[in-house]
Image: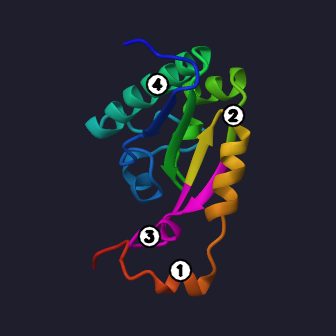
Amino acid sequence: MRCRPGGLVMIALDCRSYSKMSRGTHGRDWLRPYGNQGYTFVHEGNVLGCRVALFLLVASWRSLVWVLEQPHGSALPDLPRMQFLWSVVQVYTTYFYMGLFKGATPKRHRVWTNVRRLAEALSTRAGYMSRAEQTACTGQTVKK
């Protein structure tokens, strides 16, 4: 596959292995970023996270614009490979609310990108959601 400068890469990495809701199982924290690798989903998440870091490094080298998305509170940025990426590529981060993009829930997400203007535009468009706007979203994030 040939990539041309100026292309856009969007990645929404599978969050099962990195989410706050799975912390009790995946066992990730800043001291143990690889978590409990006895679980297949944790091991696969580590492999995928490392591959994404490598892919974003190559995409940056090829002058591609990239965006990586994860739910707020994700443990993905604690992976050593991601830490390496952050150290060698200028990365900008911001948050946005899915509810402001007609999402069923107000769920907050975090985005990393190598383009500052993109992060600023996303933050301006959806970086804040009032309590009234959040309660207007009809979807449930948890099924009881």
Which of the two discs, 2 and 3, labels the residue nearer the N terminus? 2
Crowding at mark 3 (Cα within 10 Å: few <14, some 14-19, many 20+) = few
Q: Confirm or deny contact between disc 1 and disc 3 (CB under 8 A).
A: no
In this rendering, which labeled residue sits more in front, label 3 or label 4?
A: 3
Crowding at mark 1 (Cα within 10 Å: few <14, some 14-19, many 20+) = some
Residue interval drawn in magenta: 93-109
How far is disc 1 from disc 3 in space, using C-alphas? 11 Å
The residue where tag 3 is placed is 102
Which of the two discs, 2 and 4, labels the residue nearer the N terminus? 4
Residue at point 63% right, 54% down?
Answer: 122
Residue at point 48% right, 21% down?
Answer: 55
Q: Amino acid at mark 1?
A: Gln
Q: Which mark is residue 91?
A: 2
Which of the two discs, 1 and 4, labels the residue nearer the N terminus? 4
Crowding at mark 2 (Cα within 10 Å: few <14, some 14-19, many 20+) = some
In this rendering, which labeled residue sits more in front, label 2 or label 4?
A: 2
Q: What SS does tag 2 mark?
A: loop
The residue where tag 1 is placed is 134
Crowding at mark 4 (Cα within 10 Å: few <14, some 14-19, many 20+) = some
Image: 18 above or below 91: below
